[in-house]
Amino acid sequence: GRSLGEIIRQGERSFSFEFFPPKDDAGETQLWDAIRALEPYNPTFVSVTYGAGGSTRDKTVAITGRIARETSMVPMAHLTCVGHTRDELEGILDLYIAEGVYHVLALRGDPQEGPRADWTPTEGGLNYALDLVELARSRGDFRVGVAAFPEGHPGADSLDVDADRLVAKANAGAEFAVTQMFFRASDYFDLVDRVRERGVDMPILPGIMPILNLSAIRRQGELIGTSVPDEIVERITAAGPEPEKVRAEGIKIAAELCEDLLDGGAPGLHFYTLNRSKATLEIFEALRITV
Ligand code: FAD
């Protein structure tokens, strides 16, 4: 049979890389090293997150604009409702157009209290990602993506309500979704089933985060509603204590998840790179994906 690498290379599946705006010059160098190292793989798109904290916000515009101008890749800019008025969001969308950035991931973002807290929207701002999907669609010729949650968003009362929210974003004009990190392929496929049952066929790209540091991932998972299954905790724990062996097991687990996802019909893979190319390239090696 063909390798997964061949299937992706032949354009049958999407793959993409996510970056975040760095805080300083060293981070900027690291980001561009990662972008340049991954560019030869010819991803479908690369995305840059939008800092809800504030300090890195205009950097998303600058970095996606530079990717559009100076690389061969299609940039996707994340944008969040949090902390902005509608006028400001319109201004940022106009900046993206001016920079040649036409793909936007429309998100609510998280207030400082985190995703679980009751959300007090900005005065004159938007309440939900859904509203931002509509705004982007009306403001320009944008291709709009949205967030999806295989284990449900922590603020949704049930997985069915969560799927209803995602479907509403699709019906408002979102063309694709990217998922939060998750570690069970069945959680992803169950989400896809819930969305299909509601008559929506939007592609849902699974977000892949290798576990290189178990306690960091568990802490982050706690916040965002992603659980690390016991069998994965056991495998990683058994691989240790040497950090290289833990890392290798984390890469192996991520590669297995990628295989299960593609075998089961996922339309692609979206890698959370954390602005480094190494782990993603190790997963690629395991999947026999080459330049
Ligand atoms: P929404 O779709 O607005 O949903 C938020 C909550 O509101 C959910 O609980 C939903 O069930 C509920 N809800 C929706 N509609 C209604 C309604 N009509 N009535 C009542 N409740 C409703 N954050 C950043 O700050 N910057 C980023 O760049 C960023 N990138 C991300 C990329 C991906 C792929 C993912 C998965 C998340 C990202 N996030 C980012 C985090 C995201 O902002 C949070 O997960 C946030 O809590 C939810 O965003 P959302 O777009 O799903 O919001």
Image (spheres, rainbow, N blue to C red):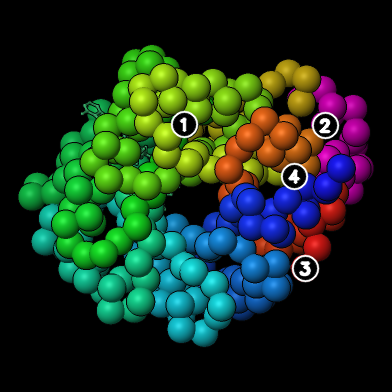
Front position in the image: 61 or 170? 170
Instruction: Name the kind of residue labelled 4 in the image.
Output: Leu
Residue under circle 3? Answer: 291
Give the side of residue 54 with respect to residue 70, left or right.
Answer: left
Disc 1 element: loop
Q: Which residues are magenta?
A: 233-252
Give the quarter of the image for residue 113.
Answer: top left
Disc 3 element: loop
Instruction: Name the kind of residue labelled 1 in the image.
Output: Phe
Residue under circle 4? Answer: 212
Mark 2–mark 3 Cα distance, whole angstroms, equals 29 Å
Residue under circle 1? Answer: 149
Residue under circle 2? Answer: 236
Mark 1–mark 2 Cα distance, whole angstroms, equals 24 Å
Task: Identify the residue at image location x=70%, y=67%.
Answer: 41
Compared to residue 246, the image places residue 97 above or below, namely below
